[in-house]
Amino acid sequence: MRNHKFRGTFVAIVTPFNPDGGLDEQGLAELIDFQLKNGTNGIVPCGTTGEAATMSHDEHHRVVELTVRAVAGRALVLAGAGSNSTSETIELTRHAKQAGADGALLITPYYNRPSQEGLYQHYKAVATAVDLPLIAYNVPSRTAVNLLPETVARCAELPNIVGIKEASGNLRQVSEVIGLCPPDFAVLSGDDFTAMASVLVGGVGAISVSSNVVPKEMAEMITAALDGNLTKANELHYRLLPLMQAMFIDTNPAPVKTALAMMGKVKSAALRLPMCALSPSAEEKLRAIVRAGGLL
């Protein structure tokens, strides 16, 4: 099952909500169209940025189905399907396959703090249960557990574990994963700040938060890095750096949703508790950076 199709720029897309907290289905379709018109290679619904943690299972299923329908084969759909419960992860991954997703993104189980053996057994159980390309997702800042390179290499021996979203922000760890895993194992950066550098050391793309607001520029940066055009990749990295920093001025996805609302790309920056709106001072700083980036 291993292949190279998970390559390029993927957006960890926000889930637009109406002011009353319900799904804005039309808004999601419009966001996806905006992404695909600007060079994004894949859509990742129901991830951290998509607020999957506060969705019901029915809503999670609905967002994946809507995404597959809106993409309509124009790009890849990598559906967020992770949980801190292996059985729940299997259920969500089965649904992703039934809905027509091209693969599933599986975050390391959070809160439980499993051992490295527990992490391996988790991924093995999902890979055994569902015949679908699977991308592991390592983000220690969110989960309190680090999927170590040696464990990633063990997971890479499973035929349908085809890659990893590596969001430790640690280039040494990224390099160790690349060095230990087969050449056809897709290492995707999950950290905007090190995305360009991760590609230059052998990664094959990025799953990006900033792509929500600057899809064309992020796609151009990753393409330049993949093509070995260091001058262009470097220039784009530093041009985008202030905006990348602004996307994390507060906990993701509050800043990116607020920026999209400022740009008129979503009707509302509504979040679900316990996520809440930016403070007035943070919103003012964000607006200044978004304006400076020519996005208003």
Image (cartoon, rainbow, N blue to C red):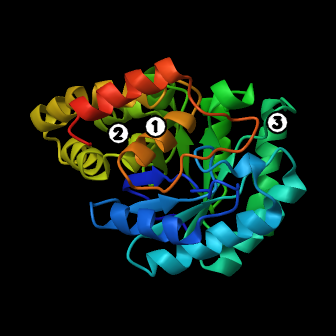
- Secondary structure of the residue carrying tag 2 is loop
Where residue 125 sits, quadrant-wise, is bottom right
Q: Can residue 204 be seen in the rendering of this structure?
A: no
Residue 194: x percent and y percent?
38, 28
Label 2: few (<14), some (14–19) or many (≥20) C-alpha neighbours in 10 Å: some
- Between 71 and 287, which is closer to the camera in this rendering? 287
Q: Which mark is residue 267?
A: none
Q: Quadrant of the C terminus?
A: top left
Q: CA distance from mark 1 to mark 3?
A: 20 Å
Residue 83: x percent and y percent?
79, 49
Residue 130: x percent and y percent?
75, 69
What residue is drawn where x is 59% and y is 74%? Answer: 66
- Between 253 and 75, which is closer to the camera in this rendering? 253
Q: Which residue is mark 3?
A: 117
Q: Which mark is residue 178?
A: 1
**How many numbered marks have been drawn onto this rendered protein structure?**
3
Q: Identify which amino acid the numbered label 3 is placed on.
A: Glu
Q: Left or right? Give the position of 125 relative to 173.
A: right
